[in-house]
Image (cartoon, rainbow, N blue to C red):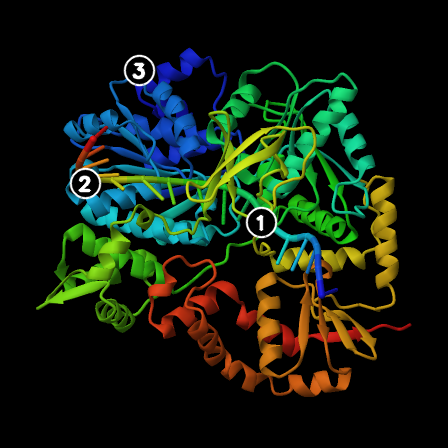
Amino acid sequence: MSFELLSEPIRKYIRDKRWEQLRPIQNAAIARILTTENHYILASRTASGKTEAAFLPILSKVNFNDPGVQVLYISPLIALINDQFYRVEDLCKNMEVPVTKWHGEASRGAKNRLIKDPSGVVLITPESIEAMFVNRPYDVKQLFSNLKFVVIDEIHSFIGSDRGIQLKSLLSRLQEVNVKSFRVVGLSATIGDYEEAKLFTGDQANTRVLLDKTSKEVNAAFRYFKQEKAELPLDLLDNLYAETKDNKVLLFPNSRGRAEEVAVKLKKISERNNGHPYYFSHHSSVDKEVREYVEDFAKNGHANFCISCTSTLELGIDIGSVDEVVQIDATHSIASLIQRVGRSGRRDGAVSNLFLYATNPWSLLQSIACWLLYKEGYIEPPAICKKPYDLLLHQALSIVKGYSGLPIYELVSKLRVNFAFKEIATHEIEEIIQHLIATDMLEQLQQEVIIGIEGEKTVNSRDFYSVFKTEENFRVTNSGNTIGELPFSPQLQENENILLAARIWKIVYVDIDAKKIEVVPAKDGKPPKFSGGGGIIAGKIKEKMLEVLYSIEEYQFLEETAREELRILKQEFSIYVIKELQYERPMQLSDKGLILYTFTSTKINRGIALLLELLEVKNDFDEDNDRFKVGVTKEQFSVALSSLDNAYEKIDESITATLEDNPFIPDSKWGYLLPLKYKAAVMRQKYYDIEGAMLFLKHVKPVANTA
DNA sequence: ACTGATAAAGGGATCG
């Protein structure tokens, strides 16, 4: 029994809580963490007690009389740190262990107290670790050179992203300053690639995964309401109102604008029907305090409510349990669907209720595909960038600044041993450093490098600590109260009416210089406009969509409207006789050319477009219908494809040419500082799946329509 | 020719 392995204060904590038994993931974690020296990844569904699974054994094992901070907890969100602070403090209450929050909004006083007497548990963000390395490297040493454990919460949110590579690098740098190496425990409900998760410990071979596969029962119902205009159909809203009015509901409409539209319209319907007024919106443009109010209302209020939100309520922020989760149109990933479904039925024994409303046939098909994959237990693997030259460059600047200059060979050696960059060769590191010197980002003094004149501007900016780009926002206020922040768009003019924070406003004044918008309440308005590229979708989801089109199965979770729409869509595709799903794809022939339905990932589609361009085949990808319109005949198309290998050879040249015109790489904040060659390499890895596209074009067997 | 098109995350030191 793992309970016996715990220290007395922790056993007392469990007794006081009157827990009848420990959860499976807790039992497993306690036994393993206390009896081995391995690193662990704890994978278990939301609300299964993962935080305790990590902290019960860690707090039992660690000797807090040792000098320095003993346990470092890293979270992707400030809001999550603030939540977890209370839980960890509670866990520590029978011991003399200080718990300190360390992030941009945390109290200076508490931080200063920690510096004076470093001990206990610290809760921190990756950006705050970065800032500490840059501005107070001596504090890093003083605080974190005797760590025993590092806990990474919601580790999936880091995997496959730039922020994840940054975190890996910071962990590597932390290990370097530690006297003895610390152990890592990663927590998540949705891991699509365990090997990749293991890389975060820096020691894959000694990392074990503890997986609790128990899942909750979920009732799913699919409904279909065709959207003909820009606005959501009225019958959908009426149906949604009837479904949700007597429940606690989280509603995910996939975009900020639609979140506002749904919240405001449901509130109006509720008003007409004398229903409750508790309709909220929750997303990044809603003011932080307003969001906290909504979270508190959900957590503490006994009344029913409906929060129309985006991925802001996807991660572990505590809002208690809801009765229903509503998804309007398909999620972009299975991981997202898992997190959202996990928001309902959190109480023991409670069933999760999921409603999916589709507004167009393609989205219905994608929703069905996601749901089937969810039930199969599939999670898409993250996109991996093997050679993140842009992140290496950022970390090089951070190291030089932190050390106030160091010999070049030392800088090279620090980057070479950093496990975040183990695929990058020494000569590549040297070449990038030489480029930084040539561009005045670094300055060479004999054998030393220090930050250069251009580099100072970058490194001394507050914007240096993060590796993601952010848009510029205008603050929206109403007589002294902040409602939220909106990215500027031509829509934001005086006398325009907009929706924000589930309310309707008229813009009375726009101050371009101060980036402020003053509003007053109004009666009718439009959702704010947001611009942005599309998200990327995994190949497996697209393949599943094709499978559903040609499956004879009757899905019980489809209600009549959805069933009928799927039947129509299948009928349309029945003119293509597809038998082998791996490479056969529907192809529609016409006088103008042909249309190829690829049913593959976004990144492969981008690769296909680029390759076709290099083959001088005119093509246009139609996102809404997931197909290529190709301006040649079927015969010309196959002739062109025979020169595929030649096109492949020209890929780098082509990407380089594009970057010569515009130095900024999509989704890479620091990539623009790289030498052109490396810039192209980053873009090739991040934006395209060229190898996947080659494989696809080599094997694809287009199946023309029979009619 | 025109419209419409995911979201989200972070932050130092100093001066008044």
**A86 on left or right of A341:** left
- Tell me what residue is drawn at x 67 percent, y 67 percent: A621
Q: Nearer the viewer, residue A569 or A225?
A: A225
Q: Nearer the viewer, residue A554 or A7?
A: A554
At mark 3, the secondary structure is loop
Check disc 3 and give the amino acid type: Asn
The Cα atoms of the two marked residues, 3 and 1, are separated by 57 Å
Can residue A252 be seen in this snapshot?
A: no
Helix, strand or loop status at disc 1: loop
Q: What residue is pinned by disc 3?
A: A94
Are there few (<14), some (14-19), or many (20+) residues within 10 Å of tag 1? few
Lower sequence index among marks 3 and 1: 3
Q: Position of residue A525 (x, y in %)?
A: 68, 36
Location of mark 1 (residue): A490
Q: Residues within 10 Å of mark 2 (few under 14, many from 20)?
A: many
The residues tagged by marks 3 and 2 sit, at their Cα atoms, a distance apart of 26 Å
Q: Where's the C terminus of chain A, which quadrant?
A: bottom right
